[in-house]
Image: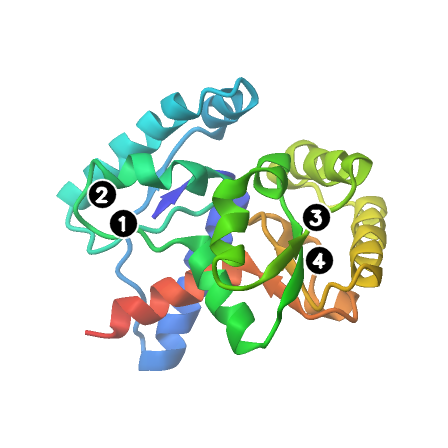
Amino acid sequence: MIGGMSWESTVLYYQIINETVGKELGGLHSAKILLYSVDFDEIEKYQAGGEWEKAGEVLSEAAVNLEKAGADYLVICTNTMHKVVPQIQTHIQIPIIHIAEATADVLKESRIRKVALLGTKYTMTQDFYKKKLTDAGIEVLIPEQPDIETVNNVIFKELCRGVVSENSKQQYLAIIDKLAAEGAQGVILGCTEIGMMISREDTQLPVFDTTRIHAEKAAYLSIQD
């Protein structure tokens, strides 16, 4: 696992993976995990400056070290940094479990054809993530520009700092309601921290938490052999 983006959501990955393995195997079983946790401040500055290649270099170094340590596959514990997956993959032989592909599989199983996407402004507006969904035949709806800024600001100024605000939650739910009115059949929590604030009980739309989807996919793969 490459974590730390933010460390709050990486904690959830670790918890979900171990809970899933324990549930499937029983007894005192837990997951065999290698974790490389980066400094998110460095990564966030590269994101904000549009220096994605430099951010990719940091994660590629982490990936190489994990492969050398014996990892069989790689889990990047963030949605946004999947933008640099092609760059990372050139440095390693082990496969990367892509969070958007895992999410698309669950959406198809749930027969969702039009979905709302919440995440960082990079995830919502750029194609690296949405294309994985549209290639799977799923139409993607994103908020209007002011709401994109609201969603993004809550992620970086609150959730990534461990702050969960009731006011921000209500703003998110209002945005989800707007997208539901546009025909969304479900909502993707396309940032690994959003699940700290929004749950399935909060909205009538089916909620697809990418943190849980991704972590469970990794857990099941780890016990297949």
Residue 184 location, quadrant: bottom right
Q: Give the residue drawn at x 78%, y 66%.
A: 203
Measure the C-alpha gap from mark 1 to mark 2.
Answer: 7 Å
User: SS of the residue at dot 3?
Assistant: loop
Quick check: marks 1 and 3 in contact, CB under 8 Å?
Answer: no
Q: Amino acid at mark 2?
A: Leu
User: In the shown orientation, is residue 33 left or right of residue 210?
Assistant: left
Q: Nearer the viewer, mark 1 or mark 3?
A: 3
Above or below residue 204? Residue 124 is: above
Measure the C-alpha gap from mark 4 to mark 1.
Answer: 28 Å
- The disc at residue 198 is 4
> Which is nearer the eye, 31 or 44?
44
- Name the residue beneath numbered marker 2: 66
Residue 120 in view: yes
| Pointer 4 or 1: first along the chain | 1
| Pointer 2 or 4: first along the chain | 2
Q: Residues within 10 Å of mark 3 (few under 14, many from 20)?
A: many
| Pointer 3 or 4: first along the chain | 3
> Which is nearer the eye, 199 or 182?
182
User: SS of the residue at dot 2?
Assistant: helix
Picture coordinates of residue 163, whole percent (x, y): 70, 41
| Pointer 1 or 2: first along the chain | 1
Q: Give the residue drawn at x 48%, y 30%.
A: 40
User: SS of the residue at dot 1?
Assistant: loop
- The disc at residue 34 is 1
Picture coordinates of residue 164, whole percent (x, y): 72, 46
